[in-house]
Amino acid sequence: MKAGAAKTSGAHRFERVIAICLVLVGLLHLLPGLYLAVLGGSLYYALAGVALTAAGALLWRGHRAAYFLYLVVLLATLGWAVFEAGLDGWALLPRLNLLVGGGLVMLLCWLLRRPRPAGAHILVACVGLLAILGVGAGLWSLRDRTAAIAAAPDMTGVAPGADEWPSIGNTNAAQRFSPLDQINAGNVGRLAVAWKVRLGMPPKGMVGALQATPLKIGDSLYTCGMANDVFALDAETGAIRWRYDPHIDRQGIAAAMCRGVTYVPAPSAAGSAADACGARIVILTHDARMIAVRAADGRPCETFGSGGQVDLTTGMGPIPRAYLYYTSPAILVRGKLILGSSVLDGQKTREPSGVIRAFDAATGRFAWAWDLGRPGQAGEPGQGERYTPGTPNAWPPLTADDSLGSVFVPLGNATPDYVAAHRSPLMNRFGSSVVSLDAESGALRWVFQTTHRDVWDYDNPSPPTLTDFPIGGGTRPAVIVPTKRGVFFVLDRRTGRPLVRTVERPVPQQPVPGEILSPTQPYPDGMPSFSGDRLTEAKMWGILPFDQLWCRIKFRESRYDGDFTPIGLKPTIVYPGYYGGSEWGGVSVDPVRRIMVLNVMHFPLRNRLVPRADADAATYQPFDAAGRPLDIKHWAQGGTRYSAQTGPFISPIGVPCTQPPFSEVAAVDLATRKTLWRKPLGSAAESGPFGIRSMLPIPMGVPAVGGSMVTASGLMFIAASQDRTFRAFDTRTGRILWQQALPAAGHANPMSYYSAKSGRQFIVIPASGHPQLQDGAGDYLIAFALSKKG
């Protein structure tokens, strides 16, 4: 009797503990749920809170009805969850996980209370059903992880030039297409690390990432590191042949990024002074210099500019420290190095000019400038003058059609980003546009605007990609313009006119006082859109019901009227945000199969404007005493009526407030304009609340920054994703054929080349992680290949 009594007493105490937990969970549903209901949101949380609190009270008093009430809540929640989210496993997770787990605890409590409880099988069946649904959703998500395909024969020969990769996009068209086919669907599964080299971590006090796609010329690779240094490596072994240190003035520079270098062949005029350097590698630096070094040994090319370098601050006027810098390489077109620039985002009006400039590739002498504030003036500013400050700049790589002599420039918006009242008519005309310039003179050929009066930071982030676009039974020379909006414009690269149906649609209005918005925005209806579904409260997400409820409340407290919702004085949901849609990795095009491969982000922001008086009172200081940014969520926007607060829309535990996928990879048939396939990019293994890795290898679509590469054998390679994995897809079907863990995530476009020394095709990816994505830290350049023959 004493043992039985003790058992009963222990069960009673356990029941009391569960009762207290139920009341707490109920109140955490009820109180914020009532506020959500007042905001016009779902009534579920308030109703579930009442029922769970009541179940807890009944359980405290020992009433059997508590168990049946909990079962009712569980079944009602299942019905509500499926009604809101369908059978999407990730969307069901925060709606069901807590109550399903609680159901198992309640079942245990019942079993302890009654040795053979009547009706317990009902609860067991319901909990088991939900568990099966969860496992089934997980298995469904895990489908298509690998595919077995019959081996194809190895490459028997390499066309002249196909073994190299002479610019970051392989050619100036930026198709990121390799004509090599040794690595194919049948043998890609045998890819293994051929060599790995470390290029050096960022200098002390800085953060950075390797974003450069290496070049391959002859038997050497050329690339840049996070210290803005230049490397030459043996293409077969990865051994470093030489390194050039430009000795950057790092004061005020917090981030170390370099997206590549430029290869300039030896000048054709043999015996000239410029020819003494032979072929050279050109790099643009964080402290605004253009430097040329000999490709053979890395020594400065003394005949280039002044002692091997050109001062890129010439004509810019006074520049605050770190306000002008260079991350993307110059492009070589018809003997000229043509370049844009980067400026410090969001700080004030009249920041350094976004002028586009050209220099003689052999001598470094100034050739021309396109300064939209000085139309028709291609020379450098005169004494006491400067290039027009505050104009839209081009921070991504440029592309070019060498036969047409056209350079295609993806422009951002005029500084600062989130208001437009101060901008001139020319700034509003050219902001967030792609322009075509004459490579010989810098004259404007055409302009096409992808966002009118941009106050969302929707600058064009990607190199436009050139291709022969199938249309009307033939092809037209086209330029594909990826955007942060996740839409893709296709233009005739001779005229700038759309080659697919493009329309102007009305967009939301009612901006802050003093601002005027465009009543319409352009949409390329003739191409698939990857901008993501319109957000609703039901699409808010979390790991548990509590952070999902928090996200629902914040959504209801914010303004959201679809894309192009004006940023206001109260928080505004901006979706897609400035992370993309597309980002600087751009798209890849298989010109044989006429397939465009893309990757996009789905990651909203929650922004608001702060009136100048309030901002000044809060002493928004974007820099510390050393000139390093303090908080990129606060943008001073000096010289305007408002400052800005921006940031990702995430829950207090660091989980995105919108449901997965947060990134996708997809392929579009350019002939039919149809999506061949699209799927989440990356698994949940490296993600989790508070930055804790979940270790769950379930496809999720995690944040991804970087781009792809396609090959003649029908493969697409991409790293980019937060889960530190390098993958190969079948370009036509989207099947994952191979994947390899990296020591840190890879946020550059891969490249490929052929080495005659071993008769092998190599695939190369940098792996460094990204400070904002918190996906590892490294300084690796890694090459993959098949095993050596024989």
Image: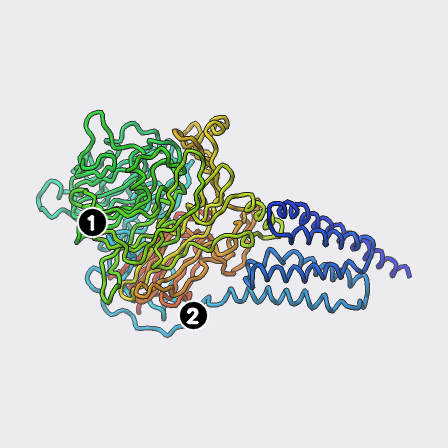
x then y, percent, for residue 567 = 45, 40
Q: Position of residue 616 (x, y in %)?
A: 47, 27
Graded by Cα atoms within 10 Å as few (under 14), some (14 to 19) or many (20 or more), the crowding at tag 1 reads many
Cα separation between marks 2 and 1: 42 Å
Can residue 194 be seen in the rendering of this structure?
A: no
Nearer-N-terminus badge (2/1): 2
Seen from the viewer's position, the closer of residues 576 and 452 is 452
Measured from the top left, where is residue 748 in percent x and y? 36, 51
As helix, strand or loop, the secondary structure at mark 1 comes to: strand
Residue behind mark 2: 147
Residue 456 figure quarter: top left
Q: Residues within 10 Å of mark 2 (few under 14, many from 20)?
A: some
SS assignment at label 2: loop
Say which residue label 1 marks.
406
Q: Nearer the viewer, residue 776 or 12?
A: 12
**Residue type highlighted by circle 2:** Ala
Amino acid type assigned to the residue bearing label 1 in the image: Ser
Q: Which mark is residue 253?
A: none
**Which residue is at 9% across, 46% downward?**
269
Count of numbered labels shown in the rendering: 2
